């Protein structure tokens, strides 16, 4: 187990789900945790329920990762206060599902701005400071198994953004490897973790909520949301994430059950075979009847 006591973790999307599990885990290791999120009520609940151990602390910060200046201001404050960051989790994310050609432009913009530009803002604001801090650091970007598997039905906006997070983190890792500083990167690819990700609409006004136009989409949404709700607890998941971090892994894949599907995708690419329907596999049940 690494000695994390007194070191600093910055976590975006820390108020609930995976981010909150990571925050609690870091606090248990005696770290100073800067928990940043757009959801103030959930941040307050995290703060109220958190217990710190000697040497550590929790600071809850309102942050919308879509704002470059806001992320830059957070980084400036954190470095002024602590001087170094050991772990930066660019974790905030939202989910939009449904037929790609029916998603309104606002859905595409929302998910791109949070899932992709939020990560980009974190990298731009923190990496230069971490390279200059003179001690080790790691940037952990939350992608998804959807950022490794391809083209799940009704998941174009989500999987599209997650593929970008995976690819940009691979580039970041390569770029950091040639710098003369002990700073590196990992990509975190969760499978099913019991969180609020399938109710991301709670974070935007009612009139902007996603309306799924067909029974097949609604059935798919409910089935996947159900299996995510039955997934790992965020606290158990956080423990597994740290096993990978302490083993110095780039690929943080705490739930390896999807690897057969990944091999199937690669086989389909290598042999130029058309993709099989993923509808049943993703929803864990037979494919719904297609509406006429
Ligand atoms: P969650 O909804 O419980 O947590 C996401 C957090 O991000 C929330 O606290 C939310 O308020 C915050 N957030 C959303 N928009 C924000 C913004 N603009 N600025 C700052 N914070 C914002 O869901 P989660 O599952 O814990 O999601 C965490 C990450 O894990 C996401 O990137 C998600 O895509 C990824 N992920 C989750 C699963 C899963 O099964 N839960 C699987 C794969 C990937």
Image (cartoon, rainbow, N blue to C red):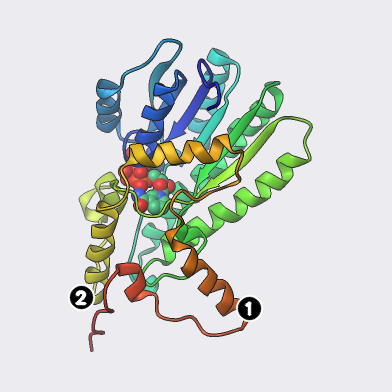
Q: Between tags 1 and 2, which lies in front?
A: 1
The secondary structure type at the circle numbered 2 is helix
Residue 138: x and y in percent read 60, 34
Left or right: residue 128 versus residue 52 is right
Residue under label 1, please give it.
Answer: 270
The correct choice, above or below, for 209 with respect to 221 in the image is above
Q: Which mark is residue 208?
A: none
Q: Which residue sits at x=39%, y=19%?
A: 58
Q: Residue furthest front?
A: 1
Residue 237: x and y in percent read 39, 42
Residue 77: x and y in percent read 52, 19
Residue 269, by quadrant, is: bottom right
Left or right: residue 240 versus residue 206 is right
Q: Which mark is residue 215?
A: 2
Q: Which residue sits at x=28%, y=47%?
A: 196
Q: Residue furthest top?
A: 54
Q: Which residue sits at x=57%, y=24%?
A: 85
Where ligand 1 lies, by image quadrant?
top left
Q: Bin the neighbour count of mark 1 within 10 Å (Cα to Cα): few under 14, some 14-19, many 20 and up.
A: few
Residue 72 visible to the viewer:
yes
Left or right: residue 284 versus residue 264 is left
Cβ at disc 1 under 8 Å from ligand 1? no
Q: Quadrant of the C terminus?
A: bottom left
The correct choice, above or below, for 110 with respect to 68 in the image is below
């Amino acid at each position: 187990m690494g000695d994390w006591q007194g070191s600093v973790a910055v976590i975006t999307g820390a108020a609930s789900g995976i981010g909150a599990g990571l925050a609690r885990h870091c606090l248990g290791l005696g770290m100073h945790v800067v928990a940043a999120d757009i959801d103030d009520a959930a941040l307050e609940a995290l703060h109220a329920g958190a217990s710190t151990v000697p040497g550590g602390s929790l600071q809850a910060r309102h942050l919308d990762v879509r704002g470059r200046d806001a992320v830059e201001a957070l980084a400036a404050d954190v470095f002024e206060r602590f001087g170094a960051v050991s772990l930066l989790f660019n974790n905030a994310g939202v989910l939009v599902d449904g037929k790609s050609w029916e998603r309104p432009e606002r859905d595409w913009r929302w998910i791109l701005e949070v899932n992709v530009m939020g990560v980009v803002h974190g990298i731009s604001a923190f990496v230069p400071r971490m390279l200059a801090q003179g001690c080790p650091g790691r940037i952990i970007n939350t992608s998804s198994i959807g950022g490794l598997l391809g083209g799940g039905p009704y998941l174009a906006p989500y999987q599209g953004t997650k593929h970008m997070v995976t690819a940009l983190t691979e580039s970041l890792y390569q770029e950091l490897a040639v710098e003369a500083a002990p700073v590196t990167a990992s990509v975190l690819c969760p499978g099913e973790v019991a969180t609020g990700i399938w109710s991301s609409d709670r974070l935007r006004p009612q009139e902007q909520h996603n309306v799924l136009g067909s029974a097949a989409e609604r059935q798919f949404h409910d089935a996947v949301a159900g299996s995510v709700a039955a997934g790992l607890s965020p606290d158990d998941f956080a423990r597994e994430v740290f096993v990978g971090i302490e083993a110095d892994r780039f690929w943080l894949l705490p739930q390896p059950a999807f690897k057969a599907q990944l091999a199937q995708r690669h086989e389909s690419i290598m042999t130029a075979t058309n993709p099989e329907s993923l509808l049943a596999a993703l929803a864990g049940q037979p494919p719904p009847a297609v509406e006429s």
